[in-house]
Amino acid sequence: MLGVALLVFREVLEAALIVTVVAAATRGVARRGTFIGGGIALGVIGAIVVAIFAGAIEEAVGGSGQELFNASVLLAAVVMIGWHVTWMSSHGKEMVRHMQQVTDSVKAGSSSVAMLLAVVALAVLREGSEIVLFLYGMAASGAGRLGLVAGVPLGLAGGVAVGFALYFGLLRIPIRHFFTATNWMLVLLAAGLASTAAGFLIQANWLPAWGNQLWNTSWLLGNGSLVGQALHVLVGYEARPAGMQLVFWLVTATVLFTGMRLVSHRMAARKQAQPAARSTVPTETATTG
Amino acid sequence: MIMKFRFSPARGTKILLLALLVAALPFAAAAAGIPEFDLTIRNHRFEPAILKVPANTKFKVRVTNRDSTPSEFESNDFNREKIVLPGNSITVFIGPLKPGKYKFFDDFHQDTGQGVLVVE
């Protein structure tokens, strides 16, 4: 039973941490619960579909299907997070000011929130498909029905509990720093996902490693430990990273950080120009109305 | 709104990552001539449980699952994970590794599925 609970817990934990960061980053967005719930539901359906077609996925690309599928899912999530953080840089401050309100900017940004729904779905899909295959194996072998019945809810509850703990921890961040903090977490999360994607492409021999094990900090914190695993998801921690993984991490972090900066600078410039533009608004509404 | 269409760092990221992939394509062709080693999963155990591989060279391990349930070939020591469906084989590229012992396991059957790569 403990074995089942532990495996389910570890997989759920990975998805739960990503969902938590997304939930925090979309704080105050209208119908956020529906978005995240929908993302999770889509992810669960996706996980079952992926598990069913696991064999076909593997054989699709000359025996590297699994790696390419994982890398694509991860990189898609990176792009979506990138889109969101740059959008947040332009609207985050307004969201802070109008917490709990459906402002125009939040409405306009619903496409960005939809991106995060997809990130949630992809995270659940990736980790969930492993759980589905594992549970299928357990059920098929007929061994330990009790283990399944007791272990699955236990592992699920444990993983979700850690997610909630992190969420309520994040809520303690003062509101004026809140979205800066969640944006940074999203950037680190995306950098870590990109690094993991690079790992899969190295495993499939699609990318050179550029130094297979650049350093080894497993004596300090192993990727098999729970803390190591949590940090792997949140910031992309690897005890023994390949050079190429470091490159992916750095490129992603730099691109997203620069994107965030550029957009917030432009927004600041627009804000200064706004008083002049505002005077034209009433005349426009008068002519259209 | 206009903003979003004019400036798209997301697209930039995508282009950059694509460029990295394209740059790596010729590399994938050089996969031939890499030494291959075999592992079999039977009764949720690895055969052999101790696999000797050469140091400082890239190699591939072919894992065949003879059980009727899925397994996952995984290692934290050499950073690999791949699901092996029942009756199927997978190939994983590993290394180059420095001499030493590197543990691997079957993530779905950890109580029995344990093995070691002895790199020398």
Image (cartoon, coloured by chain):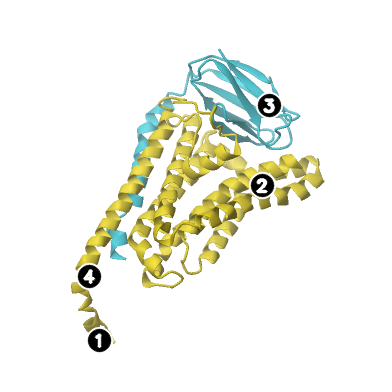
Chain colours: A yellow, B cyan
Please name the residue shown 37% across and 46% down the image: B14
**Amino acid on which the number 3 mark rests in the picture:** Gln
Left or right: A145 as drawn, with respect to A226: right
Please name the residue shown 54% across and 60% down the image: A36
Q: What residue does disc 4 label?
A: A274
Q: Disc 3 and disc 2: Cα gap in Å?
A: 22 Å
Earlier sequence position, callout 1 versus callout 4:
4
Q: Secondary structure at mark 2?
A: helix
Earlier sequence position, callout 2 versus callout 4:
2
**Amino acid on which the number 2 mark rests in the picture:** Val
Residue mark closest to the camera, 2 vs 4: 4
The chain identifier of the residue carrying mark 2 reads: A
Residue A98, by quadrant, is bottom left
Asked if labels 4 and 2 touch by Cβ distance under 8 angstroms, the answer is no
Q: Nearer the viewer, residue A67 or B78?
A: B78
In the picture, the disc for residue A132 is: 2
Residue B51 seen anywhere in this rendered image of the structure? yes
Residue mark closest to the camera, 3 vs 2: 3
Q: What residue does disc 1 label?
A: A286
Q: Position of residue B114 (x, y in %)?
A: 68, 26
Q: What residue does disc 3 label?
A: B114
The chain identifier of the residue carrying mark 1 reads: A
Q: Secondary structure at mark 1?
A: helix
Residue mark closest to the camera, 1 vs 4: 4
Q: Disc 2 and disc 4: Cα gap in Å?
A: 53 Å
Q: Are marks 1 and 2 on the same chain?
A: yes
